[in-house]
Image (tube, rainbow, N blue to C red):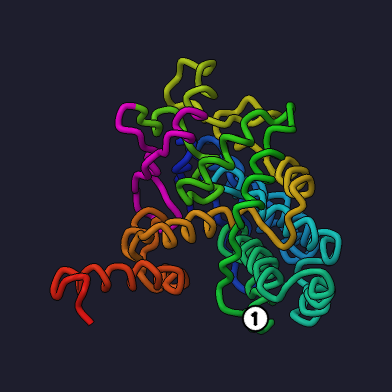
């Protein structure tokens, strides 16, 4: 019995029809089409082939390899995720390690063995991120493709992670980074991107998804319409960032919905700029050790704290849904708390009170 499921992409608006043919004691068969008439025609011919014994459903499914999942999954996440490139980089490792494995033969032991290789070069926290990317891809194979019934990564125990890091730039490191960001003529936008990250604390995906309609030069702010936690927010623009962004926008498309930082390799309006190569070059030139792009967000939060901002203000700017996320910067606000209490005591008793 065939069922038909109409799907509309939330990002592109594209409509597809997915057919599912259920058979007793056999895996389901699914396939997607651009229109319903083609879907019905395929369903009719496939059901007829099954009845006549011309299609060995079980054998067909056993031919899929892990790389077959990755091929379909990467296409899906590029359209769906705000910043898919870290996940694609993770899957590149898994392609090399287990990509040729038949999907139905992939075991949790094989996944764990491959994961242990990561620990030679990656932290336990980063290794967990790699495993999460694999788990998401295999979950896609279950829910979207119906190619397997179980996810072998769920039996692999997560590694214990240290408390969230708060690596941030010193004054000298910050100057070196900004100077290095002007040295890549092939990536003229990278300095603007780094300034936005440093002065607003925005996530990489939030920056790369910015459109010109999100830039409010009159009110000196950027609007983040779809953040990681699913809520919209706005962040103020400092003079240095406002001027840099304004200069970058002197030559831009008339379409207000165009990306502020479009891709260098694709004309697609939904294809994001890839900055990993530029970031690696800049980080090396600046001599930064153990520093990720996401640490620019920590730097913004840390300087806000040291400048007297309270935890709630920091959380509002960074878009933290819970104050517990912001508490990692609480030790940096201690000097500000002491100054505040001293002002209160002076007001109560006078400066000469002892």
Magenta range: 218-245
Q: Position of residue 256 (x, y in %)?
A: 42, 23
State the residue at coordinates (56%, 78%).
163
**Foreground residue among 255 and 342:** 342
233 is within the stretch colored magenta: yes
Q: Is residue 163 above or below residue 82?
A: below
State the residue at coordinates (53%, 46%).
197
Q: Is residue 346 above or below residue 12?
A: below
Q: Position of residue 6 (x, y in %)?
A: 45, 45
Q: Which residue is mark 1?
A: 158
State the residue at coordinates (46%, 32%).
211
**Foreground residue among 266 and 212:** 212
Q: Position of residue 198 (x, y in %)?
A: 53, 47
Quadrant location of residue 29?
bottom right
Q: Position of residue 203 (x, y in %)?
A: 52, 51
Label 1 crowd bin: few (<14), some (14–19), many (20+), radius 10 Å: some
**Foreground residue among 28 and 310:** 310
């Amino acid at each position: 019995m065939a069922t038909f499921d109409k799907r509309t992409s939330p990002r592109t608006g594209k409509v597809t029809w997915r057919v599912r043919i259920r058979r007793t004691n056999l895996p389901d068969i699914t396939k997607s089409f651009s229109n319903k008439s083609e879907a019905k025609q395929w369903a009719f011919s496939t059901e007829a082939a099954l009845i006549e014994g011309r299609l060995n459903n079980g054998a067909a499914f056993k031919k899929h390899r892990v790389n077959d999942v990755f091929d379909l999954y990467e296409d899906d996440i590029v359209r769906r995720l705000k910043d898919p490139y870290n996940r694609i980089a993770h899957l590149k490792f898994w392609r090399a390690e287990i990509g040729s494995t038949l999907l139905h033969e992939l075991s949790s032991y094989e996944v764990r063995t491959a994961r242990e290789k990561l620990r030679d070069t990656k932290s336990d926290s980063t290794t967990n991120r790699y495993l999460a990317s694999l788990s998401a891809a295999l979950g896609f194979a279950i829910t979207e493709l119906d190619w397997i019934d179980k996810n072998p990564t769920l039996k692999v125990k997560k590694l214990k992670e240290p408390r969230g890091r708060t690596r941030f730039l010193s004054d000298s490191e910050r100057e070196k980074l900004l100077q290095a960001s002007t040295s890549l003529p092939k990536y003229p936008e990278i300095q603007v991107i780094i300034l936005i990250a440093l002065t607003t604390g925005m996530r990489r995906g939030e920056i790369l998804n910015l459109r010109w309609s999100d830039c409010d030069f009159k009110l000196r702010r950027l609007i983040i319409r779809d953040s990681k936690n699913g809520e919209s927010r706005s962040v103020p623009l400092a003079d240095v960032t406002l001027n840099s962004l304004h200069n970058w926008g002197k030559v831009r498309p008339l379409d207000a919905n165009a990306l502020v930082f479009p891709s260098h390799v694709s004309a697609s309006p939904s294809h994001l700029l890839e900055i990993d190569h530029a970031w690696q070059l800049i980080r090396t030139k600046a001599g930064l050790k153990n520093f990720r792009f996401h640490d620019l967000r920590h730097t913004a939060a840390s300087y806000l704290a040291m400048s007297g901002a309270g935890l709630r203000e920091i959380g509002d700017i960074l878009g933290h849904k819970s104050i517990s996320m912001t508490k990692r910067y609480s030790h940096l606000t201690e000097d500000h708390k002491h100054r505040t209490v001293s002002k209160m005591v002076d007001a109560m008793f006078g400066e000469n009170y002892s």
